[in-house]
Amino acid sequence: MNPSMKRAIPTAVVALIAILIPLFLNDKTVYVQTVLSAVVVVGLSLFMGYAGQASLGQGAFVAVGALTVAVSTVSFNVPPLIALIAAPVTSAGLAYVLGLPLLRLRGHYLAFGTLAVLLLVGALMGGVPILGGGAGIVGIPSLGIGSLVVTGQLFFAYLALAVLAVTMVVSRNVISSRFGRGVRAVAGSESAAASSGVPVLRTKLAVFALAGGCAGLVGGITAFFIPYVSAESFPPSMSFTYVIMAVIGGLGTLWGGVVGAVVVSVLVQALNTISNIPGTPPIVGLILQYAAYAIILILFLLYMPRGLWPTVGDAVKRRLAKRVKRSQTDYSDQHA
Amino acid sequence: MLTLEDVVIRYGSATAVDGVSISVEKGEMVALVGPNGAGKSSIVNAISGVTPVASGTIIVDGASAQVPEGRQMFADMSVDDNLRLGAWRVKDRNPAAIYELLPDLARMKDQKAGTLSGGQQQMVAVGRALMAGPDLLLVDELSLGLAPLVVADLANYLIELNASRGTTILLIEQEVDLAFRMCARAYVLEAGRIVASGASATLAADPQLSAAYLGGIEAAADRKRTK
Amino acid sequence: MNALLIYVVSGITIGATYALIGSGFVVVHRVTHVVNFTQGTLAVFGGLISYSLLSFSIPHGLAEVLAVLLTGLIGLVFAFVTIGKRGTPPLTALLITLGLSILSEGIFVTIWGQAPIAPEGLGGATVLLGASIENQRLLTAGISAIAFILLGIFFGRTYLGKGMTAAASNPRAAALVGIDSRRMGFIAFAIAGMLGGLAGVVTAPFSPISFSSDLPLALGGFAAAVFGGLSSPWLTVVGGLVLGISGQLVAGYFGGSYQTVAALVMLLVVMIARHKSLSAEEAK
């Protein structure tokens, strides 16, 4: 068996499990939302980890994707499939245009700048009638072509999974391309990257637009899935959760984004389930939902700052390396 | 006054100082010389307690204060504030005694430290270190980036301080000839190890040593001329 | 003219709030290079704690002072979590404070519920140049001014304050003279806690506060602090006043819903206009 096939086996197993899970779920909402957030987080992780920048407002691009679908189908009778394709395009385009001035900012300033964009999008959605005004947009049609209409949660589960797969393949290719090396160089040191000929701003813009596109596509799918879009649909806490997922999973790793999304979603779901057990005092529920979540986040940041995927991955690698070494030589005590 | 025994300092996996032993008697003025990157600054910072040692012991009999490399002013603050902050660890925070010792500083006490010339800043750095009332003064790169005349003034001042007040001084210096002129005894550091030590005069006279490690006193003089 | 005066005065009081919160950002950022996301949270703590203390019939004055001291203590606790562990990079620290603010929202909802709360303030109004202005707003402006003066004295005149400034300006030299930068960071967080708490205590009577007030307050304060590049307290005061007054004018003449938009756009514009000097400071 050649090494690339060997590496493909775990991926195939994970994919198979992911395909099987929805068949055993009655309500697939959480599954769909988890997979969709993984798509957003993979894009965000690319931006935060590889381009070395933070966005606290990734939900803005999810919202814009959802708005694209909602407004175009409800107000302009655009066919659903075209609306869905337009969603990532619009979000990516907006990310590009906003990124032109915004990405000149760095670190904390960019974090707050993106947060401001998110709140601006929220304020516009709440204030401008065609964007839903205060009431939100209802009556989004079902996804389909002509008279062929798909409904049902299973379809959305697999659509989300397919989108995640495509996102990961695209992201992998981006990272391993010449462009990707430029992206990593920017994360390392912008001035060094610039002096070796990497167009820093253009590189960051491209990754920002890619991450925005991922978020937009997720927004578009969500608009068809829920079918309701309002200013309250995309609260800042959701954007914070994306960042938290990316950090917990491990920035700058593709699988880290997925692991982070799954771990946080499962955690939130578990805390919800516990707090909804009959007989649980409401205060305990509240504490579980806010406090436990926040405390776990803080502990992760303090004690596993690189995130789950790289930390666990390295530990496994070290273990394997040690075993190999031990079988070859007797110097293992050097590592004690 | 100061004893280092088999001191090892590491930064990650890189060993900067590898088993250095130094001893300085009370009232002595000793030089630690060596090329750039030999580990001199790591040693003073370890003595000051800001760099951890991996192994070995450092014993300072009394209080020490450091005149850091690059002078390290609190640039936006006045000379007076810079001096007072030097006394962070001690009770007496009145710089009057320092002004008496270094009248130049009294004249510029209200100027912002960042606006001063390199030599004036070095003077402030010395004054700030003295504010802590140290028994041992660590001077890291006294001459770095300063004009020869200014260096001569500062050197004379330190010599006098050592003679009149009995302040023990460990001088870290790249300019070997200056260090040998100021201090009777010296250690030569190369790649984290002491390669020679003894009376400055003997070290300076050793042609092999001066060629191999010190770049030659003549070479140092040349460097100065071309500056 | 009358309306304009009212807008300007209420703008000043809101601006003072932003400036207080913004100074909290500045104090912490100067010393620790951390942007403390809990700055708005601390204001919420201040308002809600003073409400509770007053409801235990602790007299006015004492209740407010106690509330401010308690928020200082909360700031200190936040500091231990955020910068207690050595070597945490600033952006990770920002996310930790984000976690703390989520945690605090849970505390707010658990203890005080979800409805906005207004502690009792100074009642009545004063007629000023023909415009009637609530006394609590005048008090806010006055107390904020005193707070800024005290802050200026602390950093400019006291030995501890100078030590903190020194730790901010040259951490290496500060460490050599024996200033413990981490301890200075803890003190900075405590001061920021009191500044945030004070903002909440003085404004909550006329601008009711709830668990979700933290984000807008934090953003307003951050915007004010950005005027001063997160390092100048005086420009932060200017920034807060500009934001507060322009926000009130926009709200007054174009409608309240545009106030948020105007503030956010202004934040973005200021940051982008100043991006060169800001990123230079960030790189330090």
Image: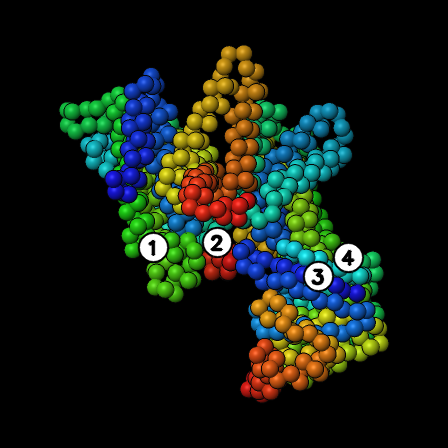
Chain of residue at mark 3: B
Apparent side of residue A308 relative to residue A80 in the rendered image (left or right): right
- Foreground of the two, B32 or B208: B208
Q: Are marks 2 and 3 on the same chain?
A: no
- Picture quadrant of residue B133: bottom right
Chain of residue at mark 2: C
Q: Are marks 1 and 2 on the same chain?
A: no
Provide the residue designation for mark 1. A181
Local crowd size for mark 1, using a 10 Å CA cut-off: few (<14), some (14–19), many (≥20)? some
Q: Position of residue A294 (x, y in %)?
A: 53, 32
Q: Nearer the viewer, mark 2 or mark 3?
A: 3
Provide the residue designation for mark 3. B5
Provide the residue designation for mark 4. B89
Residue A74 vertical placement versus A276 (above, below): below
Q: Position of residue C227 (x, y in %)?
A: 54, 54
Residues tagged 4 and 2 counted as in contact (Cβ below 8 A): no
Chain of residue at mark 1: A
Dot 3 amino acid type: Glu
In which quadrant will I find the N terminus of chain B? bottom right
Q: Position of residue B152 (x, y in %)?
A: 70, 83
User: How far is disc 4 from disc 2 in space, using C-alphas?
Assistant: 42 Å
Q: Position of residue B11 (x, y in %)?
A: 57, 57
Q: Secondary structure at mark 1?
A: helix
Dot 4 amino acid type: Arg
Provide the residue designation for mark 2. C270
User: How far is disc 3 from disc 1 in space, using C-alphas?
Assistant: 47 Å
Residue at 31% in and 44% down: A171
Dot 1 amino acid type: Arg
- Picture quadrant of residue C41: top right
